[in-house]
Amino acid sequence: MAQINVAELFKQTRRKLKLNWIAGLNGGLNSLTSETVSKPSLALIGHLNFVHPNRVQVLGCAEMDYLRSLKVAEADHAIENLFSTDLAAVIVANGEKVPDTLIAAANKHSTPLFTSTLRSPELMDILNHFLAQAVAESVSMHGVFMEVQGFGALIKGEAGMGKSELALELISRGHRLIADDIVDFFRISPERVEGRCPPLLQDFIEVRGLGILNIRALFGDNSVKPTKPLDLIIQLEMAEKLEPHLLDRLKIKTLSEQVLGVKIPKVQIPIAAGRNIAVLVEVAIRNHMLLLRGINATKQFTQRQLREMKKSAKTK
């Protein structure tokens, strides 16, 4: 599980969440290890098992109304209950006025305290989505990641096989580049992996003989995309290195590869002189679309072949 600290969270979300950092300035390095954002209503009453460490706690209208309904000593005790666990940060939403005791507690425990004018449900939705991506399990892989006909395709192969040249041809045919050479993959749900381009490599591709190319500048804004879910892996292999008995001409067996524990369909394309690999990649994606719809050309052909064999057997 990846981590992000509160200072980085504030830096990346302060405009969208309309955050104002008012207390607990020494807690910027507090780590967030969970994508869950909590509303600790029960914790204020004293049920501390409902407060989870290293999370963002949001105080909305209900929580602030409850605090205002308490006597001074009771309110102080409730706030101390809230801060007695290892909170990563606290956000007071809905533009609510922050009591001085809450500010004092945040400073005492070095817990960042933010205010926001957003309504708490909207704030929590945005924050949950951001944290789900920020703390997702991740891995970096070599290859070229493209969006081809709306599908995320990772093109893999040995160095010097022409992956970047293939990507350049696909871009010229209207498809989009996500990342060249290195792709960062994040598991954003139990069955979904998302690929992102490292910031340093954004928009760039290296083609031997041409050097570094800026794809956005060459082909326009629509030729690149920052992220895309991974749908298919395309493995390029030199045809002469593949043993004849390893080539499944009918593609009866479907290939796959595990990425962050998620099973990703895989297609193997032999590379040989005269083969138009860009067309093969496009057709591989189209065939993958058909398979998702339950249309399997291999099964259709096999069934037709069996029917013809049965007809021939009857006529004999």
Image: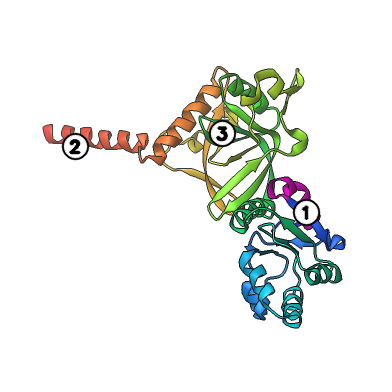
> Badge 1, how many Cα within 10 Å: few under 14, some, many 20+?
some
Q: Secondary structure at mark 1?
A: strand
Residue found at the far left of this picture: 315
Type of the residue with mark 3: Leu
Task: Give residue 288's position: percent from left, percent from top.
Answer: 45, 36
Answer above or below: position of 27 versus 251: below
Q: To which quarter of the image does residue 306 belong?
A: top left
Residue placed most toward the observer, 132 or 294: 132
Q: Which mark is residue 242?
A: 3
Q: Which stretch did the figure color magenta?
A: 5-18
Looking at the image, is 153 positioned above or below residue 107? Answer: above
Which one is in front in this view, the residue at disc 3 or the one at disc 1? 1
Colour mapping used in the image:
rainbow
Majority secondary structure of magenta residues: helix
Instruction: Indicate left or right for 11 with 60 as reference.
Output: right
**Disc 2 marks which residue?**
310
Q: Which mark is residue 216?
A: none
Q: Give the structural element (helix, strand or loop) at label 2.
A: helix
- Residue on which the image places disc 1: 20
Q: Position of residue 246 (x, y in %)?
A: 50, 38
| Amino acid found under the numbered disc labelled 2 | Lys
Q: Residue at x 70, y 31 (%)?
A: 159
| Chain-order first, disc 3 or disc 1 | 1
